[in-house]
Image (tube, grey):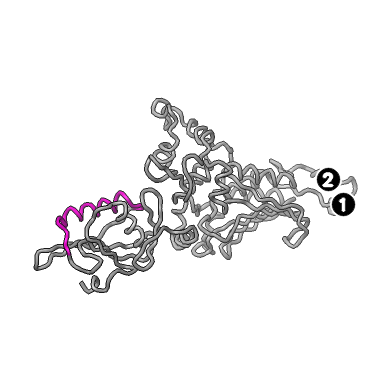
Amino acid sequence: MRLVRGGEDTFLELKVKLSNTEKIAQEIVALANTAGGVIVFGVSDQLRVEGVDDPETVQEELARICREEIEPPLVPLIDRIAFDNGRRIVALEVDGRRRPYRTRDGRFYLRFGSEKREASREELSALMDEARPLGYENVPVIGASVADIDEAHLWSFVREFEGDAFEEAALADYPTGEVLKRDLLLAAGNMGEVVPTVAGLLLFGSDERVAQLLPRSAIIAARYAGDTTHAPLVETVQLTGNLHTLYESALRFVERYCDLWETRPRKFPGGVEGEGIDDAPIAARANYQRDAVRESLANALAHRDLALRDVSTRLHVFDHAIEIINPRRSAGFVPPAQRAIRYGVPMRLSPQLAALFSSHAYGLKLPHGGLPMLSRQSRLFSGKRADVHAFNDEFRLRLHGA
């Protein structure tokens, strides 16, 4: 009662009764995403104890809301309090230790004073920065819908599993929303309004809508006439689209300025008989091992930390090196993790996205072996070890050309 007498604030919400479960779910989400708090049922805004008629039913309904209407589910702490005059109230304590939370239809709320409101894009990004980055791929994309999915791409992927996971009879009418949410776990919400997750939109979204809804997923590609970013800029482009499109666009950009080989040739083209390549008036095209470059681009796309707002993915092509700079939270990642990934220990931010992206069914036919493979292939091809660094929330990989 000391808590109630203080009135509603950031940590306390008063309700006379439990009537609108959708709004109650929103209130719980707002408290959980802010700093936790308590919702008391049976007390009016004028701080009068009215009581609830059936506290047991209220408790059961609150437990159901926390379990079914909120993602991830909350474990409720519920108290029933009886007064000498026979009136009874119910108090729900909300703990936000696993935030961010969202309603079943994929909406995030925050509490400001005694009011709640839907979180803005900036506020949602800030919540993600505080959370473990592992869950960002499962966040529904605000403003997205099933109409933003490239159905030809999605169903081309699904049909690769025909006879096993894919059943023609059950999915004959191609229910995109159902498959996206129920089978692939790449969407949230009710079946009437399915919202693709970050992973779902990046993997199977139409190129135009991915660029609009997830602008930070773009790659800034640049070619420099030298070996540093202070050299003259030859070309810069912004690559956009889903992961399939981004990978192919990035690879085409590299191939525009470099030669890729399966194995190192006995002699690289561009030299003049009796004259070294380094003596030529124009720098020869750099040469790289093909699988090392392809794996580098695939790793960059599959393991980006998109929860970071101010760090973009950059692809730099220099005269004698290729550098890929990716957003990656430095805290907790270096230095031990930098050694571990060289041995092939995975440090995946988005395991579900990475698994589908690297699947043969996705259509890219990517090389396998991760950082150990690309490091070895690059070293054997060029004679120089690939450089790996992580600092200031950036992961940098540099491959040296031959």
Counting residues from the start of the chain, the first of labels 1 and 2 encountered is 2
* Of the pair 11 and 95, the residue shown nearer to us: 11
Q: Quadrant of the N terminus?
A: bottom left
* Of the pair 385 and 38, the residue shown nearer to us: 38
Which of the 4 quarters of the picture holds residue 262?
top right
Which of the 4 quarters of the picture holds residue 96?
bottom left
Is residue 167 rendered to the left or right of residue 203?
left
Is residue 127 rendered to the left or right of residue 276?
left
Judged from this view, the residue extending furthest toward the right is: 274
Q: Which residue is mark 1?
A: 280
Q: Is residue 212 magenta?
A: no
The x, y position of residue 52, in whole percent, is 17, 59
Above or below — where is 85 with respect to 62?
Answer: below
Q: Amino acid at mark 2?
A: Gly
Above or below — where is 168 with respect to 294?
Answer: above
| Residue drawn where x is 88% and y is 46% of the image | 272
* Of the pair 162 and 336, the residue shown nearer to us: 162
Q: Which residue is mark 2?
A: 270
Above or below — where is 84 with respect to 185?
Answer: below
Q: Which stretch is magenta?
A: 50-72
Decide: marks 1, 2 in contact (CB < 8 A)? yes
The x, y position of residue 114, in whole percent, is 34, 66
Q: Is residue 51 magenta?
A: yes
